[in-house]
Image (spheres, coloured by chain):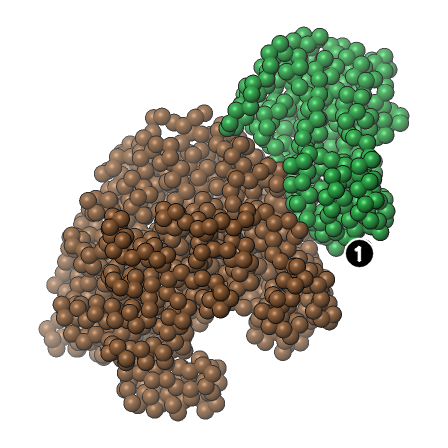
Amino acid sequence: MRRALLVTADGAEFRGMAVGAEGVTVGEAVFNTAMAGYQEVVTDPSYTGQIVVMTAPHIGNYGVTPADDQGRGLHCAGLVVRSMSRIASGPRATGRLDEYLTDAGVVALAEIDTRRLTRHVRERGAMPAAMGSDVDAAELRELARSSPDMAGRDLVSAVTTSKAYFVPPVGERRATVAAFDFGIKRAIVDQLALRGCGVHVVPAGTTPEDIMAIGPDGVFLSNGPGDPEPLVGPIATVAALMGKVPMFGICLGHQIMGLALGASTYKLPFGHHGANHPVRRLVDGGIEITSQNHGFAVDLWSLSSKSPPRPSDGLPGPDRLPGSVTSRFGEVVATHQNLNDGTLEGFRCRELPAFSVQYHPEAAPGPHDARGLFDRFMELMGVGHAASG
Amino acid sequence: MPRRDDLHSILLIGSGPIVVGQASEFDYSGTQAIKALRAHGFRVILVNSNPATIMTDPDLADATYIEPITPEVVAAIIARERPDALLPTLGGQTALNVTAELHRSGELERLGVEVIGASFDAIEAAEDRGRFRELMESVGLECPPSRVVRSIEDARLAADEVGFPLMLRPSYTLGGGGTGIVTDAATLDRAVALGLAASPVGEVLVEASVVGWKEFELEVMRDGAGNAVIVCSIENVDPMGVHTGDSVTVAPAMTLSDPEYQEMRTDAIRCLEAVGVQTGGSNVQFAVDPVTGRRLVIEMNPRVSRSSALASKATGFPIAKIAALLAVGFTLDEIANDITGKTPASFEPALDYVVVKFPRFDFAKFPDTDDALGTSMKSVGEVMAIGRTFPEALQKAMRSLEIGDRVDGVDEVGLAELVASCALPRSDRLLRVAAALRRGATVAELAEATAIDPWFLDQMSLVEEVAHQVEGEGPSADGARAAKRLGISDARLAGLWSLTEAEVRARRAGWGIEATFKTVDTCAAEFEALTPYFYSTFEDEDEAAPPSPGTVVVLGSGPNRIGQGVEFDYCCVHACFALHEAGYKPVMINCNPETVSTDYDTSDRLYFEPLEFENVMAVIERERPEAVIVQLGGQTPLRLARALAEAGVPIAGTSADAIDAAEDRRRFSALCREIGVPQPPHGEATSVREAEEVADQIGFPVLVRPSYVLGGRGMRVVYTLDELIEYLRGLYGAAPSEVDASGAPVAIDRFLEGAVEVDVDALFDGAELVIGGIMEHVEEAGVHSGDSACVIPSQTLSEEARKLVIRYTDALAQAIGVRGLLNIQFAVRGDDVVVLEANPRASRTIPFVSKATGVPLAKLATRVMMGESIQSLRDAGFPLPDDQVAGFVSVKVAVIPWPKFPEQDIVLGPEMRATGEVMGIAADLGTAYAKALLGAGVRLPEKGTVFFSLADRDKEAGLEVARIFARRGFRLLATAGTASFLAERGVPAAHVDKVGEGPWDPVTLIQEGKVDLVVNTPLGRRARGDGRMIRAAAQAGAIPCITTVRGGLAVARTLEGAAADVLQVKSLQEWRA
């Protein structure tokens, strides 16, 4: 193992060992608190441009298997862990994580005080960092400082599929879905296919006309990396499709739908990345433990004539969100709320068949509490209830 | 769904005495629950027979009943208090079983009490093995193939169906009682018979065995609205086949991929829903096939359990407190996470560290017992350690056990043999595995032999590889950093580098490699933590706040073990409370997850650390305390006192040298001579010849023991020279002629037959002595004070003897230089008083004395240690004891885990075996003793047959016992010698045959249930004959067996009172009023 170094844009240095590919990498340092699911994380296209710090200390324990890949290849800019396993132990393993990272050219560091780095990001916000071996601290700091901010960057064009492809349904075909690939995770396509959807996965730049030409029963807006605001094309496309066909968005797809409705988005201090975030269903008060991975959020207050209440002491309540607001597509109702910080986790249009959530009902990694949302999409498409996965 | 307003008062049932499988974790959970419920305005009524608990402190609950936890007694309490609700899920299996019985008998309905936190359907569904399996299958979960049987014939059929090996699981048992793995038809019948006997409903599940599969447990919390969260996943290092309580376990799970874990998570929640758990904590146990990943549900507990306590400490999520709040109507999102203060309890803790639980065994106390581990739990305590990595946590856990890191003989056997020996799970298995790795065994071959997941073995191998490398390279900063980051101790580095531990410390300091402290915060640093709960590691950043004035460190008592149990934790917790009240900032260091002391709100700061010099010093250097309290946590902190004092650490109260003066037998003898306090005739020997001489001089019988012991380890009463030689041979493991004990002398005291033993707990501030309590033992001197029943106030001491006891206590306190607590044991015969031993520290009787007298001795002692005088405390309004409390009698009875060690003879002796204790309070001694016995699980017959078999030396004293039984209408049976002795003195007793020699074989009579009580005093240590078989038969048949004459007398006296008096319940607050 070679000695390696990570330096953040504000100059904090973290020493460790290189356990992945040779070289130097730059990205926005974000931490993920999921205790398992490292492979799903490093292959999730939403992490494009980010150096992921896993807060769980032991990573790589159960190896890797192609079955758990979420995108084609690895997408994160780098991986930082406390301890990288030397062996892959598990019935599903086909290889070791460190070798997987090396083969994919991903720079990874181990033996880092990941808790210190996490606290650093928590207190000062997500920020660029650079890391690698055989490089000095000043150089890394300069690389980190000069790297572009996540805000305002279009990262989707780098990860979206270059041409459309079709994923057949499992069993009998019950619906046809056009799924925008902004960096789509395989688990989402799997969940749709499991429910009998034939899924046309289409590039981010696909036009409304091309979508309608597929003749879809529903349109799905996928997750993806970075800031939604620069994605003007997809936002306009979604606005054009609103009301024409049932629509469901997840994560970046949720943000794009929010922007299409005329709401604004904003950057969270250090985002939500983990598998333990409580979300309340505002309709019945029930709680789902959810998988989350986003740095930006939708501000529904931007569509309200009222202003948000001042944060009060105690647990964040429903008053942190506007109950319902009026958009260019009619009334929009907040449906889900994050119980840790009170932020918006989902909304639906009252007059149009469209809804979206900020979190990841497909999990991977994370709890399966919220998979019922895919059933709701099926209902919205008029194909009722069926066996779910 | 906020708090229910229709409930006003709630009865909480505790778990009773500490036994194997049910320890102080339920004090922790009950205490949390009581605090939480009272904070929300409920009137809380508590019943628990165990005085050594924080929950039974009179200021905790509104009404505290120290009464036996039996259906009759609990019903009497309910009838008296009329609570609106009963919360049975925080007192272990004891509380659940009593509640279930009250439900079945219709009492609960009759008394109009609502059970909250659990439903009977759910309890039955989880406990009834057959129904559980059906329910699981109904929601698509798989259980091992199995069948419920109620007879041996059924079991044979089931075995044919299920196939060998198979697992037997009796319904409604605790700690794996009666369970076992059966590999062939030859042993099936006996195992099933044991299982049927162990199950209170005579029902056993015959189940396909999944030995060698991976084992996991998920801790689930569910609220009344149906929201569920997983608090913690736990993975067992030891695969299926070893009881979870005896397994080394790790949190969070280390070897599950996300899909595997999430499916298990969903299954766990489904399991709770299927069973019908309304609210609260439950755990679900899974087995996973390491080859195919196939997952089976093994069992679930619909209540707070041992693993809930572990999960709480491991994550910072207070399961018991939240379970109590959920039971009264709150939902998870309405309760704040105490640690962040601004996020709700409806989340799943994320860990950025690794927790290892390691069981603590005490097989040395049960030498006739094999230490092979199986499905019936045998450990008596546990430790938990937190590290940034598994190797660090594992090594910290092993150091926390206080048993050393060596196994005898591992370096002498061949490597193949060593690896093979790892296959059988024993208490020292992981030490063997480490030794094998050190000697070059591969991860693959060890995985093959042990079925331990290769990931764990590879991590252990990493430690050995780094240790080897560091040893070869010699002392260096890089080597030290690598070793410390992996959790290798200074002591081990010292060994590797041939340096002293102090030298390693000094070099580390020079290299700037110091321990850093990280916070346990439930959220992997995502949110700021408000609670100062720390562990040490070797990283860049230290999160502990800077030292502040007024800090006092309290050293805890480490793992529960025989001789050092929850009583010491009780004292440490009181010290924290007292320090807080006096304006200090108490800092707790401890490694026992089953305690109140390791609750993060007991002290101002909690460090979850091994009680080893290195770890304790690291905290002390960080905190710079004004004082360190070592005298409340038993022997564990006491053995650190000298090293800490030498390192310049200010020790509160009695000095390290004064402690030594009392512990070192020579110094103590000299001191006694000097101040004129008599000791029994005694001497010391370093060889057999010397021992003979000493014995000759002072006369048999003698009490022999190695120096420096706690809990009477290795102590024995011997009556003859042959026995003495045998003892020495056993002690030193050599032939008598070769015994050389020059380095470790044996103490030999004249054993005072027939003397009464008296225990005194006292407090001394340098000028004034306060007697906390004078306890008279029920059993004669020679039975370890921890195993003997005792009484406050003393019942038979003459006024003269009492005066002497007090005078000697005062003289010894002065002479030793005590500042704080002092415990002295005296032997009293008539007006003669001799001192047996003096311990300048908290004793295990402090909680009992405090409950009996109402005086918070540990709190007072803490203030005295911090320099306050007894007079100033009196002026401040503290109650001070009057040693002869009038109005009621308190009896303490020990609970000994005999059933867990069936090979062991149940004779009481100078070696302590008790794991726990119960207390009985009543207006008279007989009733108090009967209550205590009932609390300890002994149901005395009111009529029937008593079998007597007395050693010659006990016959005279036994006469009175026999007389009382005869007078109360019992039929007397006796062995020939005893029968003729009794007959000659006018007490008719039918005589039986010798064992195995006739139709009136006492063993057969006992087995056939024709005897209701056995009084059998042993002939001597070596007697392995009839007496032992008689006692074993009584034990197996759960027939009360009394092995001392004075014990028999006390039992006989309970018959004098009306049996109904036991049901006259009264709260501690009322007794005190």
**Residue tagged 1:** A1
Q: In this view, does B888 lie above or below B368?
A: above
Q: What residue type is labelled 1?
A: Met
Where residue A331 sits: x, y (%)?
65, 9
Q: Tell me what residue is drawn at x 33 percent, y 69 percent.
A: B817
Image position of B217 (left or right of B582): right
Image position of B359 (left or right of A304): left
Quarter in which the C terminus of chain B is drawn: top left
Q: What element carries label 1?
A: loop
Q: Which residue lies furthest to the front in this view?
A: B549
Where residue B1070 sits: x, y (%)?
21, 44
Q: Name the residue nearer the viewer: B1057 or A360.
A: A360
Q: Name the residue nearer the viewer: B654 or A329.
A: B654
Q: Can residue A64 be seen in this view?
A: no
Q: Chain A: what color?
A: green
Quarter in which the N terminus of chain B is drawn: top left
- State which quadrant residue B621 falls in: bottom right
Q: Is residue B900 above or below residue B1068?
A: below
Q: Tell me what residue is drawn at x 52 percent, y 63 percent.
A: B612
- State which quadrant residue B1012 falls in: bottom left
Q: Tell me what residue is drawn at x 25 percent, y 48 percent.
A: B877
Where residue A242 sits: x, y (%)?
75, 12
Q: Can residue B544 be seen in this view?
A: yes
Decide: few, some or many residues near mark 1? Use Cα within 10 Å; few <14, some 14-19, many ≥20: few
- Chain under callout 1: A
Q: Which residue lies furthest to the left in this view?
A: B986
Q: Chain B: what color?
A: brown
Q: In this view, does A150 lie above or below B660?
A: above
Q: Tell me what residue is drawn at x 70 percent, y 30 percent.
A: A294
